[in-house]
Image (spheres, rainbow, N blue to C red):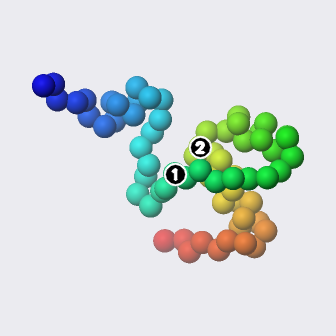
Amino acid sequence: MRKPPPKEVRLRALGVEALEPGERSERVRIRGPEELFAALEKLSPKERGRALLVGLEALGLLRREEA
């Protein structure tokens, strides 16, 4: 039996990158106007997460402690 290639090689073949420490990937339902989804589809998963963080912080709904 062949040994599987390293994780980094397998992820690169799928066109994805490994999660960083403290990161999590989830499916979440969102309701909004059509243009919201058109914009989100153009972003990478990492960019979508960043956009959500910035938006929640701007609205005062999330406060993060800087380490």
Instruction: Decide: is 5 above or below 65.
Output: above
Q: Secondary structure at mark 2?
A: helix
Q: Residue 3, percent across and down?
A: 17, 29
- Mark 1, residue position: 25
Instruction: Decide: is 1 above or below 33.
Output: above
Badge 2 vs badge 1, beta-carbon distance below 8 Å: yes
Query: Closer to the camera, 51 or 35?
Result: 35
Q: Decide: few, some or many residues near mark 2? Use Cα within 10 Å; few <14, some 14-19, many ≥20.
A: few
Query: Closer to the camera, 65 or 5?
Result: 5
Of the 4 image quadrants, the one containing the N terminus is top left
> As drawn, which residue projects farthest toward the left?
1
Q: Amino acid at mark 2?
A: Pro
Q: Residue 18, percent across and down?
A: 41, 43
Residue at position x 40%, y 26% in the image: 13
Q: Decide: few, some or many residues near mark 1? Use Cα within 10 Å; few <14, some 14-19, many ≥20.
A: few
Residue at position x 44%, y 29% in the image: 14
Q: Is residue 23 left or right of residue 10?
A: right
- Mark 2, residue position: 45
